[in-house]
Image (cartoon, grey):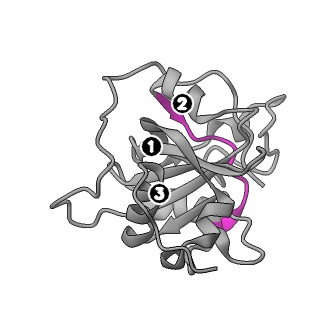
Amino acid sequence: MSPARRKAAAPKNASPSKQTALPAGRAGSRFWLVKTDAASYSIADLQRDGVTPWTGVRNYQARNTLRDQMKPGDRVLVYHSSSDPLVVAGVAEVASLPRPDETAFKKGDDHYDPDSDPSDPTWWLVDLRHVETFKAPVTRERLALELRLKRMVLLQRGSRLSVQPVTPEEYATVLELAHGARGRKTR
């Protein structure tokens, strides 16, 4: 299940980068996929806003990824998980260090958690910055046909995490598919 998104977002920062190739020479760069309900917050909303706090993640494993592993500059595939068809819609990058998700402390917020204590926060977030909206989103069906993606977490049976790792090779393959390069269909 994807985290619900609010339309309000952080103010626009500098214009987003247009490069989506694998970052060269950045030691420790990692790649991720985040799921979002396109009706609540889509890649078009992220493009409009420029930067947004990625609020509402309420799964411990996904939270641990946000809090402990995601770093500024990491690239992120944005996946519309409640759309027809399901698609990777574009690319973002992590734009901040992790910090507590304040929506957990706000009564009345969709993501309010009465058990989360501001002095010992349970839930965390990072800011995401828009990088690219794909002209032709890559469907889940197309991803599943690609031999090079057979081990991608997104495609594994029962995979429901809203924040998940992507290997550099998987990231490059998704970009090839999005930009029209021919992939190897095998299934």
**Amino acid found under the numbered disc labelled 1:** Ala
Circle 3: residue type: Leu
Q: Is residue 55 magenta?
A: yes
Quadrant (top left, top right, bottom left, bottom right) of the N terminus: bottom right
Q: Amino acid at mark 2?
A: Leu
Residue at 54% from the left image edge and 30% from the top image edge: 46
Instruction: Place residue 70 in its image quadrant.
Output: bottom left
- Direction from residue 159 to residue 97 in the image, left or right: left
Q: Position of residue 7 (x, y in %)?
A: 67, 23
Residue located at (64% from left, 70% from top):
144
Residue hosting label 2 = 46
Which residue is label 1 attached to? Answer: 92
Occupied quadrant, residue 111: top right
Q: Which residues are magenta?
A: 51-61
Where's residue 36, x and y in %? 68, 45
Q: Which residue is mark 3?
A: 177
